[in-house]
Image (cartoon, rainbow, N blue to C red):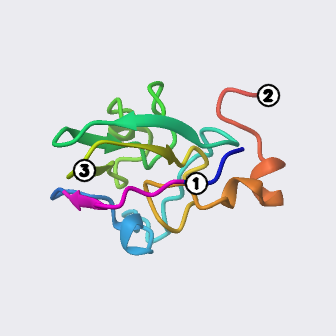
Amino acid sequence: MPALQRPAALVTLVSGACAKAAGCWVRSSSGTPSRPAIAAKHPYQVDLKAGKRYAWCACGHSKKQPFCDGSHKTATPDLSPLRFQLEEAKSAWLCGCKHTKSPPYCDGTHKEEFIQKAELPGQS
């Protein structure tokens, strides 16, 4: 896999970004942290346009990975997508495992054993 690329002009986070972006998990009404589903065991290479608003799926349930399709509203209502906008166009690797420490970008966490051995949604 090619080296991970981070946009030089990072991102502007738009209001409503998920709490995971700040390095924490949102707590559900039961008091237990909501954890995202592992959507993929690999990152997604995407070409991002300058000025366009994106919503990176943070819950792992979207059918339009790595972007949000609104599935979190029923699957994990206390997790929201990470909304961001780039200042300049870039190609980037966006996290597919949803456990990155630098959302929405892949940090290699998908290579860890707990991700590689995990069952993906829809697998049985």
Q: Earlier in the sequence, mark 2 or mark 1?
A: 1
> Which residues lie in the magenta part?
5-13
Label 2 secondary element: loop
Q: Is residue 78 above or below residue 65?
A: below
Q: Is residue 36 above or below residue 43?
A: below
CA–CA distance between discs 3 and 1? 17 Å
**Residue 119 appears left or right of 91:** right
Question: Which residue is under mark 3?
Answer: 86
* Residue drawn at 45 percent across, 35 percent down: 46
Q: Between residues 45 and 34, which one lies in front from this camera angle?
A: 45
CA–CA distance between discs 2 and 1? 31 Å
**Could you say which disc has been placed on residue 124 in the image?**
2
Which dot, 2 or 1, sits closer to the camera?
Answer: 1
Asked if the stretch drawn in magenta spans residue 8, the answer is yes
Expressed as whole percent of the image width and height from the top left, the position of residue 83 reads 26, 50
Amino acid of disc 1: Leu
Question: Which residue is under mark 1?
Answer: 4
Q: Is residue 46 above or below residue 38?
A: above
Q: Quadrant of the N terminus?
A: top right
Q: Between residues 101 and 118, which one lies in front from this camera angle?
A: 101
Q: Earlier in the sequence, mark 3 or mark 1?
A: 1
Amino acid of disc 3: Leu
**Can residue 66 be seen in the rendering of this structure?**
no
Q: Quadrant of the C terminus?
A: top right
Mark 2 nearby-residue class (10 Å; few <14, some 14–19, many ≥20) = few
**Residue 121 appears left or right of 78:** right
